[in-house]
């Protein structure tokens, strides 16, 4: 009987079980360390890229056919369409950021401190230090006109649609 107990796997070699548990805890600690290091390496990479937030779709290109001016109050910009070419002007005053308005006879004025801008956004009267910003337009693969609110372009830049 005692030889059965000594040879039985269940009661045999408690030392081996201890070794197994020791090895298992070492492997667990090692795996946890590797996973933690991988997570720490990912920290410098942003999960959301700021540039993706500055690009917004304004509508299908057909919306801007012909000659038109479309106001987008939610983005504070105008899109001008002139015979198949588009350009966008920001309505954010370059003085202190008020929203400029269009004025009769063309151009823009700022109700806050009275700056005036020409039809292309150039400063006519201060205190605005520089012209209104022209924003980059592009076409998305699904045929939408996209504006990048962070990318300034020259006033002569046009998007052909
Ligand atoms: S904010 Fe437009 S003139 Fe001051």
Image (cartoon, helix red, strand yellow):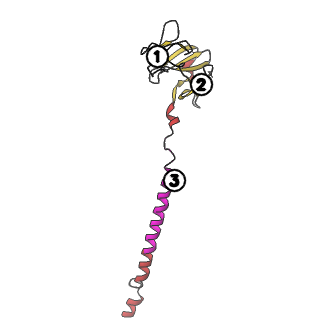
Query: Residue at label 2?
Result: 153
Give the residue number, with chain letter if any, for mark 3: 41
Give yes or no for contact between labels 1 and 3 (Cβ–Cβ under 8 Å): no
x%, y% of residue 121?
Answer: 55, 16
Question: Which of the two labelled residues, at mark 1 and mark 3, occupies the earlier sequence position?
Answer: 3
Query: What span is colored magenta in the figure?
Result: 22-49
Q: Position of residue 130 (x, y in %)?
A: 54, 19
Q: Looking at the figure, which quarter contains the C terminus?
A: top right
Spatial CA distance of label 1 from label 2 is: 19 Å
Quarter of the rendering occupied by the N terminus: bottom left
Q: CA distance from mark 3 to mark 2?
A: 36 Å
Q: Position of residue 92 (x, y in %)?
A: 48, 21
**Badge 1: residue crowd in 10 Å (few <14, some 14–19, many ≥20):** many
Tell which residue pokes out farthest to the top in this image: 105
Please, what secondary structure does the residue beneath circle 3 have?
Answer: helix
Q: Is residue 34 magenta?
A: yes
Disc 2 crowd, CA 10 A, few/some/many (<14, 14-19, 20+): some
Q: Quadrant of ligand 1?
A: top left
Is the residue indicated by label 2 positioned so its CB lies within 8 Å of ligand 1? no
């Amino acid at each position: 009987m005692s030889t059965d107990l000594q040879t039985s796997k269940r009661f045999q070699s408690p030392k081996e079980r201890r070794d197994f548990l020791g090895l298992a805890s070492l492997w667990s600690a090692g795996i946890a360390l590797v996973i933690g290091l991988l997570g720490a390496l990912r920290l410098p990479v942003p999960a959301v890229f700021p540039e993706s937030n500055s690009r917004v779709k304004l509508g299908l290109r057909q919306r801007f056919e012909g000659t038109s001016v479309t106001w987008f109050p939610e983005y504070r910009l105008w899109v001008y369409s002139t015979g198949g070419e588009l350009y966008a002007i920001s309505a954010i005053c370059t003085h202190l950021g008020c929203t400029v308005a269009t004025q009769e006879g063309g151009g823009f004025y700022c109700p806050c401190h009275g700056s005036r801008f020409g039809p292309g956004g150039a400063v006519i009267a201060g205190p605005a230090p520089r012209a209104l910003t022209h924003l980059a337009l592009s076409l998305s693969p699904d045929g939408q006109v996209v504006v990048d609110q962070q990318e300034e372009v020259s006033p002569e830049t046009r998007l052909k649609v």
